[in-house]
Amino acid sequence: PIPAPAGAAPAASPILCYNIPKTPKEELPMSQLTQQLLDRFLRYVNIPSQSRAGISSVPSTQDQWHMARQLEAELEIMDLEDLHLSDRCVLTGYLPANLPEGFTGSVPKIGFCCHLDTVDVNLSPEVHPQVVRNYPGGDLVLNAEKGILMKAAEHPELADYVGQDIVFTDGTSVLGADNKAAVANVMTMLQYFTDHPEIHHGDIYVAFVPDEEVGLKGSKALDISRFPVDFAYTIDCCALGEVVYETFNAGSAQVDIQGVSAHPMNAKGNLVNPTLLAVDFANFFDRKETPECTEGKEGYIWIKSIQSNATHATVQLAIRDHDKARYEARKQTILANVERLKHQEPRAQVRCTLEDIYGNIADAMTPDNRQAVDFLYEALDELAITPKTIAMRGGTDGSYLSTRGIFTPNYFTGALNFHSRYEFLPLPSLEKSCQVTLKLVEKVFRKAAGK
């Protein structure tokens, strides 16, 4: 196992959490790669690093600095070059190419981007992982003291992992595999190539960014000059084999409505109720084009919140669509409905602010950079992993990086149920994810070498 650097946070202790006594199965030793990944993963989830929405500064929480400095210390031991932790908690560096003597080819520079933060869904920021060896199937008591059960009937996805070693939460937090499984993956890959100088590869760049969960703010704070890659990858989706190179185009809108207050005794003809106007505005939209009524590549406008008082109301909206033209049309729908509200009540002051957040990765794919996707499918094929290509109803840091000219597809961590107390990470899937990372680096060099 990879030792923790001096001063590193200790790994959380694995705990068995079977709820029903069963005949113990023989516990086979983990592979060296799995053990290394698990050691790192447990160490990283032991560092709280939730981000927080509504904070203008980056990072949005101080805890993310602890995670960044932990990684910085480990990367210093690996002698990465140009290692830099910015004043916005973006950690970058690269492992220089290790090429054969006399090699004259050009090896593409490959990058990997992972986010430091875990999501805040009103659960504990402290993660207490539990490792179940040879999961026997059936229900699990995640937390006997709090009576938190994970029922197999409610989570049929568990059935695919019977007999595997799996990391679960204790039911009080998310697991944090989103995205610390990826961090463990990339750090283990770097350690592997550092420890094996006989293996040739090109330049490998890394970027660890904060605040992905609150609007991809960390990737937006990344100094692109410190990440000069030909293409990159995020490792930020779920089950074994998942591949994503299509994501939403995403934007937000805020509509501010200024009304007129009046006492009820003389309200007629004077009062302009901003709360009722906000409700009217929400009702202008098609109820069938909302998150709860759409799937696949169907886009939506989501009324996320309405906040109001006697004089002012604010409506927050999210805009999503895989198709760029339809995305732009949805923005125009919002603006048209704002004009409709102004016409309905001329005495109100109504203002709309629109912001683009990220784009569809696929829109950045060109004949020159699509090799990043080709390498990914070839790696899966060589590792006998069945690809599961999905159009993500969301985005990754790669969605933003792709708009900056760095084509960045995404592949699986192996974890399931992101953003939930029922998040879990099958260790065989985590190992397969890391094998894909290693294989990608290998294939990039091999193609450049004509092998």
Image: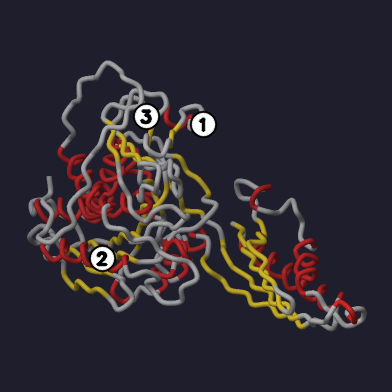
| Residue matched to label 2 | 66
Q: Residue furthest right?
A: 268
Q: Nearer the viewer, residue 216 or 231?
A: 216
State the image quarter where residue 239 is shown: top left
Q: Earlier in the sequence, mark 1 or mark 2?
A: 2
State the image quarter where residue 281 is shown: bottom right
* Disc on res. 257: none
Identify the amino acid type marked 1: Glu
Identify the amino acid type marked 3: Tyr
Q: Residue furthest front?
A: 265
State the image quarter where residue 203 is shown: bottom left
Q: Earlier in the sequence, mark 3 or mark 2?
A: 2
Q: Nearer the viewer, residue 214 or 364?
A: 214
Residue 450 visible here: no
**Whether residue 186 is situated above or below residue 144 in the rendered picture:** below
| Residue matched to label 3 | 161
x, y percent for residue 344: 87, 75
| Residue matched to label 1 | 154
Apparent side of residue 272 relative to residue 443 in the rendered image (left or right): right
Identify the amino acid type marked 2: His
**Whether residue 71 is situated above or below residue 13 in the rendered picture:** below
Q: Secondary structure at mark 3?
A: helix
Between circles 3 and 2, the one closer to the viewer is 2
Image point (36%, 52%), residue name: 235
Image point (89%, 79%), residue name: 265
Q: CA distance from mark 3 to mark 1?
A: 15 Å
Q: Earlier in the sequence, mark 3 or mark 1?
A: 1
Q: Which colour style is shown?
A: secondary structure
**Whether residue 48 is situated above or below residue 384 in the rendered picture:** below
